Image (spheres, helix red, strand yellow):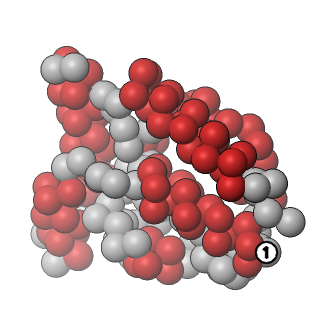
Amino acid sequence: MPIFSDQNEKDLYIQGVWEKVESKYLQVYPFLTDHEFRELFGEKLLNIMAALNCPQENCGLCDTDIDCPFYSAKLDRCGIDPYKPVHCRLWHCYECGPRQIVKEIRELTGIFADQMGPEMRAREIKSALERGEVSADAARKRFEKLIEEFRTKNRTFQ
């Protein structure tokens, strides 16, 4: 069973999300809190995603698939979990559920994950962690500080 009944419904949904991004979340996008993500994408999509079940939960393969600059195998979870990026929240592997639903969610990932923000600085932190120059705890704190600075700076200059 697909997420959207037809292309028109999908187009209207995408338009509605973009309108909310532009009117309310542009200054902090794509790094959203759980509440912001829920409000932006709506209950229907979140309920569908909650029903998906990845048999390899926390394996890190999805993070590797999307080349996330905030994920390292040396972390026990996302390095910026409080502000997990939109594309990370949306991305699911095909093992998680019905192929059609995962395909549609992946399409939404591509539409709403145009930019990542401070990617270069995040990759520097990740590299230092993986070289053993900083601890996982220190790297996580640096990631979170980086995103908080990003959100604050963008809010200030909008």
- List the single residue furthest toward the right: 1
- List the single residue furthest toward the front: 8
The residue beneath circle 1 is 98
Residue 47 lies left or right of residue 117; in this view the side is right
**Quadrant in the picture for the N terminus:** bottom right
Residue 9: percent from left, percent from top? 71, 46
Say which residue appears at 70% left-offset and 81% top-offset.
Answer: 95
**Quadrant in the picture for the C terminus:** top left
What is the quadrant of residue 129 in the picture? bottom left
> In this picture, is 121 found above or below 66?
above
Residue type pointed to by label 1: Pro
Residue 91 lies left or right of residue 47; in this view the side is left
Task: Name the one closer to the observer, 131 or 111.
Answer: 111
What is the quadrant of residue 66 in the picture? bottom left
Task: Name the one closer to the observer, 20 or 82.
Answer: 20
Say which residue appears at 43% left-offset and 22% top-offset.
Answer: 24
Say which residue appears at 50% left-offset and 59% top-offset.
Answer: 109
Say which residue appears at 56% left-offset and 44% top-offset.
Answer: 14
Can residue 57 be seen in the rendering of this structure?
no
